[in-house]
Amino acid sequence: MKIAVAGAGYVGLSLAVLLAQKTAVTLVDTDREKIALLKQGKSPIRDPEIEEYLSHKALKLTVTANAEEAYAKADYVIVAVPTDYDRERNFFDTTAVAAVIETVLRVNPEAVLVIKSTVPVGYTEETAERYAGASLLFCPEFLRESRALYDNLHPSRILVGYGKPYPGLRKKAEEFAFLLREGALEPSVPVLIMHAAEAEAVKLFANTYLALRVSYFNELDTYAEAKGLNPRQIIEGVCLDPRIGGHYNNPSFGYGGYCLPKDTKQLLANYRDIPEKLIGAIVESNRTRKDFVARQVWEKAGKESPVIGIYRLTMKEGSDNFRQSSVRGIMRRLREKGAKLLIYEPLLGGREMFEGIRVLRDLESFKRETDCILANRYDRCLDDVREKVYTRDLYGRN
């Protein structure tokens, strides 16, 4: 058994490491810097389990930029390339997925293609029809940033969907599910085999529910702040109901990151001709929350042209991802109002500017030069300037 993985991001790298415990895996990426780090046993992304496994485990893992050679020898090719949301088309941009599929079919038409990238509902079956004879599976991922390998080692469930029912394709779906379960540390994890469109829908609906939960507690917090109430008391009273529970309830500036913003919009796009109110409201709620936070920060700064500090660009503690971080939407709104922004973000290294905004590397200078500090997640290092920090982090956790 040989497996190739296209894409060394959170999804592809964590899967490659998981499967390479017992199976020969070739990880393909075009980023030479990533490849160089991986060949030294170093992770190009922040993830404690990936870092530990790369440095201390005996893995059957090869890393290369030669995609055709890797795909030509593979029994399974896992497609884990980005599918960013295209605002112009109101749909996922699946160009990168299609490019991998076409390359694999050219050099190794017998390989089973497993799509891990998030795609619109119906994409796998439509693609199987377009490329007659292609063996396509869809296997959604349910990973957290910076804990991707942990979540693969301790999965809540394994889902594999198959496209057109070519002879033996369901068996291939079961075989791939077995490979994932074999690499995990949860031998009794539930496994579901279903049609690809159903698996695609599970992915989008699951992430949209998470976005709904974030939005719910953010709107609760908005109400409490506007009315001068204690949001923590309300949240604790609500969450003591066991049907609700005390998880995923810490207010923030909005949901962000790799998945939730784009997946909610994609699910809404899939509702084109279907009645709905809730899915659209979840998407709109995230914009409304950012509008509210921007107004509150402006009022707290209390000046005509305030200097507002952005403490960290990352979406959450332990992450090195700035993409679609909720604080960036608030930054855009504050700049439009006329605020001058300063950024403190150690992960920017020696950069002097970020998107036209000055970056300070010295925390004390950052504190001194700002009228108000915006912190999506609070850190004790801000205790001495707590009075000018605006955060909605009630629990000190992600």
Image: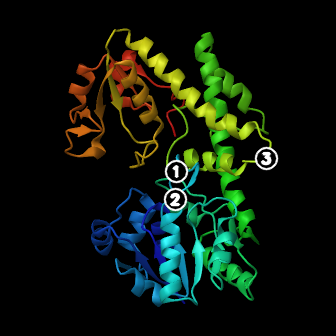
Q: Measure how far apart labels 2 and 1 are at the Cα level.
A: 9 Å
Task: Kindly identify the residue that appears in the image at 63 percent across and 41 percent down.
Answer: 211
**Mark linked to residue 274:** 3
Q: Quadrant of residue 238?
A: top right
Q: Measure how far apart labels 3 and 1 are at the Cα level.
A: 21 Å
- Amino acid carrying label 2: it is Thr
The crowding category of the residue bearing disc 2, from other C-alpha atoms within 10 Å (few below 14, some 14 to 19, many at least 20), is many
**On the rendered structure, is 11 left or right of 114?**
left
Residue 61: x and y, percent?
41, 80
Task: Kindly identify the residue that appears in the image at 59 percent across and 75 percent down.
Answer: 114
SS of the residue at dot 1? strand
Q: Confirm or deny contact between disc 2 and disc 1 (CB under 8 A).
A: no
Q: Confirm or deny contact between disc 3 and disc 1 (CB under 8 A).
A: no
Q: Which badge, 3 or 1, is on the more N-terminal residue?
A: 1
Residue 116: x and y, percent?
57, 67
Q: Measure how far apart labels 2 and 3 are at the Cα level.
A: 24 Å
Task: Kindly identify the residue that appears in the image at 40 percent across and 42 percent down.
Answer: 314
Which one is in front in this view, the residue at disc 2 or the one at disc 3? 3
User: Which residue is the site of mark 2?
Assistant: 83
User: Which residue is the site of mark 1?
Assistant: 86
Q: Which badge, 2 or 3, is on the more N-terminal residue?
A: 2
